[in-house]
Image (spheres, grey):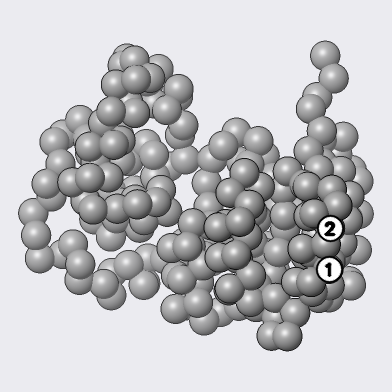
């Protein structure tokens, strides 16, 4: 059975980065680069012409791409998966990008294995943060006091589900692991988000990290 092919757009102002990613993806039969954009205007034209399944983008390129580029993509093209690969080391920027809904984030120091794993995570519907980004998330999360002064409002079962969601498992995998129906998992997730007053899965990941639930 032939493996499904995913259409990829590369959005980076640096030609060498686009070239390297394109060469890396050539080694797979799964990801097909259908276009390259050096700035936001080019990216928007390419999306309109041939909508991709995945966009790889570095937002930290003033005059070419920005954090607002990320937020625009998430708002206007919610079905397109995003993979951020950036050289940004500003912790507040990184937190802002992840909190906007980005579920896969690498630095440009990552190796080919981590890049491939991030792409595979997209196929599986999982989150993927390289170790450097996780370190930033830890630092930023523990500097926030939004949850630290209150006891956890979740049941033992809900805490289990939070842990599994934060580790990247999807509802079907969680239901199998906990011997629950998929519907029950979705119900628990809805209740968890309401109790914690969260709107996005990325915020749930930050909550789990803040409470040490991934340790």
| Residue at the spot 70% in from the left edge and 81% down from the top edge | 61
Quadrant of residue 143 within the rendered picture: bottom left
Quadrant of residue 19 within the rendered picture: bottom right
Mark 1 and mark 2 residues within 8 Å of each other at the beta carbon: yes
Above or below residue 150? Residue 53 is above
Pointer 2: what residue? Answer: 46
| Residue at the spot 56% in from the left edge and 65% down from the top edge | 71
The answer to whether residue 204 is seen in the rendering is: yes
Q: Secondary structure at mark 1?
A: helix
The answer to whether residue 114 is seen in the rendering is: no
The label shown at residue 42 is 1
Q: Position of residue 174 (x, y in %)?
A: 39, 26
Q: Nearer the viewer, residue 61 or 45?
A: 45
Toward the bottom, the furthest residue is 63
Query: Label 1 vs label 2: CA separation?
Result: 6 Å
Q: Position of residue 65 (x, y in %)?
A: 70, 75
Q: Is residue 71 left or right of residue 185?
A: right
Crowding around mark 1 (Cα neighbors within 10 Å: few <14, some 14 to 19, many 20+) is some
């Amino acid at each position: 059975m032939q493996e499904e092919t995913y259409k990829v757009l590369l959005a980076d102002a640096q030609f060498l980065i686009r070239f390297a990613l394109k060469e890396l993806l050539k080694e797979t039969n799964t990801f097909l680069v259908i276009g390259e954009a050096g700035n936001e205007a080019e990216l928007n034209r390419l999306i309109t012409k041939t909508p991709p399944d995945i966009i790889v983008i570095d937002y930290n390129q003033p005059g070419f791409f920005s954090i607002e580029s990320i937020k625009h993509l998430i708002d206007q093209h919610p079905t397109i998966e995003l993979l951020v690969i950036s050289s940004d080391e500003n912790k507040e920027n990184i937190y802002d990008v992840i909190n906007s809904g980005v579920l896969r984030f690498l630095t440009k120091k990552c190796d080919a294995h981590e890049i491939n794993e991030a792409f595979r995570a997209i196929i599986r519907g999982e989150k993927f943060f390289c170790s450097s980004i996780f370190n930033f998330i830890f630092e930023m999360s523990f500097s926030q006091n939004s949850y630290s002064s209150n006891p956890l409002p979740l049941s033992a079962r809900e805490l289990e589900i939070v842990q599994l969601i934060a580790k990247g498992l999807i509802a079907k995998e969680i239901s199998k692991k906990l011997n629950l129906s998929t519907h029950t998992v979705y119900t628990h997730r809805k209740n968890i988000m309401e109790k914690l007053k969260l709107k996005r899965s990325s915020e749930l990941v930050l909550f789990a990290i803040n409470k040490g639930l991934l340790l």
